[in-house]
């Protein structure tokens, strides 16, 4: 490809395997680009630099040298880049200042220095905006496209994938107007990968289908290989195995066109993943062996780390815990700095299961302790990071409000000053004719104006005060809700899961201490049952935090699952779902789910209801939710007391977020009916 664009993958927890595959493929694309005549190009540019007579020519050559040395020789990259910037400033050469700053930013991005990369991308893009305002030729538009596209990539390096998607999506229509088809294909493929990293696999699938058609039109076999191997990861997550095999077949056709291709190792790695998924374990191991042999021979060590994990998964499915353990230990001990806390926690847990499967219960217990310790550490780190983000967002919001208030005050003062000047000029012109009359009129006018202005200021102050009070109430309710959820989660983990794991620990310690001569089948069955119960309770806690069914299948499936789980020997929860949840955003569906969940819990825990009826009715953009129970109810006097409760306050906050209304109808000993009317964004 003539144009080189810096690409990135922003990794997320629990997407380890997918991110490793895609990140490796992107690094591989850099290596291929480096093989395609880079050294020849650098030699040619340096020769041309010695012969250049004009400063603008020297700037263009040095800027291109900075770009060519990116990812290969950082000293040369920055040396030529900063020389090009200095010479451009000296000659006030606009194109050179844009191109050189963008290429220096690319050099920083090659070495993962995203802060300096963003700094120089912003400088270069500012010059590029001025450049295309004067001359929007294709040559200048390509600089603008490259600068903006890679600014998005730099934000992705910092974990702001949403910003990355927003900026990259902005460049695509411009590239389409220019007819730069390969840029459009690369950008659409990049967006597909980003959506995959956000677990938006259906959206990623749509983008991959678009970019596949574009690559089929203008892409090289290397482009098709890169795209196909990226696409297979998305199809694997969607369990679309038939299509995954067809895409792998496309990759094989293009792989055969390129002898000794760098993509040979990843291709067989993805083929092994496919065979493992459909249960053909011998074929899976054979494919992984082919991938390992190629990667080891070509020193692509980063991908070997992934292969260790896949070997362990296949052997685990085959029941060969010895080999599964061996490859997991190789994975943990892999000599790089890319192990995340999630990877370490998951590896400890898998090793504990393997040792238990091999009847090495002492080692299983040790690994289980390591798993619990690492998981607790990870939870504290994530909680601290979340709190810091919330604090930063809160401070930023307050700062923006203060700035906006100062701007409004400044504008109002300037406007009032202009009015006074105009009035003074007018009064000065006619004062000599009707001095006394106009003086009285001017005085009366100013008096009325002051009163009106004073009244207007008082009204604005009162409105502002009311808005601030309302915002404080909403913020307090949100904070209280978060604290309540944290306390509930802490109690569930401490009293429930913590107690079970402590019991398991004691049973295993006792079993190890007693050293039974016969196989302790009964004791081990009890320990395994306790482990299963602990896992069930952990899944229940995770489901309460973010219901997986809702994310995958929508609100109706999630409510059906939750109502079934709340139906027991003493309680029956019935769901009647009329209409559809299509077109309603995920945030709105989650909030509706939390409202209904809170109402059901109140009916069962506080109203002692034996029957609960949940109705969901949607017509257009109006949704009516009714939760009716046969519990003890409450009188109007008690209803006033309930208004101050944190539970009802949180309910009202969530319903207000959904642009809805909340009503309670109840009589003592005659049950309670709660009606929620919501206006959703989609019709």
Image: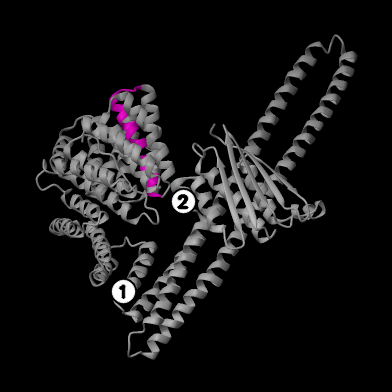
Characterize the local packing of mark 2: few (<14), some (14-19) or many (20 or more) Cα atoms within 10 angstroms.
Answer: some
Q: Quadrant of residue 332?
A: bottom left
Depth check: give the residue in front, 670 or 282.
670
| Residue 91 percent across, percent down from the top left | 32, 31
Q: For mark 1, give the secondary structure.
A: helix
In the image, is residue 124 part of the stretch drawn in magenta? no
Magenta span: 135-158
Taking 206 as reference, is 230 above or below it?
Answer: below
| Residue position for label 1 | 357
Tell me the element at label 2.
Answer: helix
Q: Nearer the viewer, residue 659 or 121?
A: 659
As displayed, is residue 38 above or below residue 537?
above
Q: As drawn, is 152 to the left or to the right of 471?
A: left
Chief secondary structure of the magenta portion: helix
For marks 2 and 1, the one nearer the N-term is 1
Residue located at (23% from left, 30% from top)? 57
Dot 2 and dot 1 residues touching (CB under 8 Å): no
> Which residue is the site of mark 2?
549
Q: CA distance from mark 2 to mark 1?
A: 30 Å
């Amino acid at each position: 490809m003539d144009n080189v664009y810096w690409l990135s993958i922003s990794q997320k927890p629990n997407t380890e395997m997918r991110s490793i595959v895609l990140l490796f493929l992107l690094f591989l694309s850099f290596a291929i680009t480096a093989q395609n005549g880079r050294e020849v190009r650098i030699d040619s540019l340096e020769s041309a630099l010695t012969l250049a007579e004009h400063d603008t020519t020297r700037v263009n050559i040095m800027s291109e040298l900075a770009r060519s040395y990116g990812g290969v020789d950082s000293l040369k990259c920055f040396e030529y880049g900063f020389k090009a910037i200095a010479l451009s400033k000296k000659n006030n050469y606009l194109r050179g200042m844009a191109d050189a700053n963008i290429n220096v930013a690319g050099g920083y991005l090659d070495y993962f220095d995203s802060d300096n990369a963003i700094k120089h991308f912003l400088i270069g893009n500012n010059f590029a905006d001025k450049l295309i305002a004067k001359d929007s030729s294709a040559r200048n538009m390509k600089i603008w496209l490259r600068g903006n596209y890679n600014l998005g990539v730099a934000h992705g390096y910092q974990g702001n994938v949403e910003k990355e998607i927003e900026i990259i999506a902005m460049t695509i229509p411009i590239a389409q107007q220019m007819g730069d088809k390969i840029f459009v294909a690369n950008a659409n493929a990049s967006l597909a990968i980003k959506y995959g990293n956000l677990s938006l696999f259906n959206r990623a699938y749509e983008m991959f289908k678009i970019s596949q058609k574009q690559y089929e039109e203008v892409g090289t076999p290397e482009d098709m290989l890169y795209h196909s191997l990226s696409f297979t990861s998305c199809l694997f997550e969607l369990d679309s195995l038939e299509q995954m095999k067809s895409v792998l077949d496309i990759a094989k056709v293009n792989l055969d066109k390129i002898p000794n291709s760098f993509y040979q190792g990843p291709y067989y790695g993805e083929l092994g993943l496919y065979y493992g998924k459909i249960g053909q374990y011998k074929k899976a191991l054979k494919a992984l062996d082919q991938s390992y042999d190629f990667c080891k021979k070509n020193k692509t060590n980063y991908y070997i780390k992934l292969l260790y994990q896949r070997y362990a998964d296949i052997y685990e499915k085959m029941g060969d815990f010895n080999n599964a353990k061996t490859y997991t230990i190789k994975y943990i001990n892999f000599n790089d700095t890319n192990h995340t806390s999630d990877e370490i926690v998951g590896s400890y847990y898998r090793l504990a299961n393997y040792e238990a499967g091999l009847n090495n219960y002492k080692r299983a217990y040790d690994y289980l302790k390591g798993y619990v310790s690492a998981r607790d550490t990870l939870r504290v780190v994530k909680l601290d990071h979340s709190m810091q983000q919330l604090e930063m967002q809160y401070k930023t919001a307050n700062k923006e409000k203060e700035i906006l208030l100062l701007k409004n005050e400044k504008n109002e003062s300037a406007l009032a000053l202009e009015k006074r000047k105009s009035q003074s000029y007018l009064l000065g012109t006619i004062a000599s004719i009707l001095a006394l009359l106009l003086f009285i009129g001017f005085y009366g006018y100013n008096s009325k104006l002051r009163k009106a202005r004073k009244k207007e200021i008082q009204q604005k102050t009162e409105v502002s005060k009311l808005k601030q009070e309302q915002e404080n109430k909403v913020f307090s309710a949100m904070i209280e809700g978060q604290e309540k959820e944290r306390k509930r989660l802490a109690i569930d983990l401490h009293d429930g899961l913590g107690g079970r794991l402590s019991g398991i620990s004691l049973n295993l310690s006792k079993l190890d201490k007693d050293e039974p001569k016969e196989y302790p089948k009964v004791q081990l069955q009890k320990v395994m049952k306790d482990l299963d119960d602990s896992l069930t309770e952990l899944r229940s806690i995770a489901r309460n935090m973010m219901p997986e069914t809702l994310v995958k299948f929508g609100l109706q499936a999630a409510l059906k699952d939750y109502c079934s789980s709340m139906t027991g020997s003493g309680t029956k929860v019935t769901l009647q779902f009329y209409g559809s949840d299509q077109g309603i955003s995920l945030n709105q569906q989650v909030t509706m789910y939390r409202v209904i969940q809170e109402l059901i819990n109140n009916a069962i825990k506080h109203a002692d209801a034996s029957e609960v009826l949940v109705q969901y009715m949607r017509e257009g953009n109006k949704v009516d939710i009714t939760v009716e129970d046969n519990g003890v109810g409450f009188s109007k006097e008690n209803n006033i007391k309930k208004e101050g409760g944190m539970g009802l306050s949180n309910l009202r906050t969530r319903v207000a977020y959904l642009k809805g209304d909340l009503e309670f109808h109840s009589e003592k000993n005659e049950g309670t009916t709660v009606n929620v009317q919501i206006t959703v964004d989609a019709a």
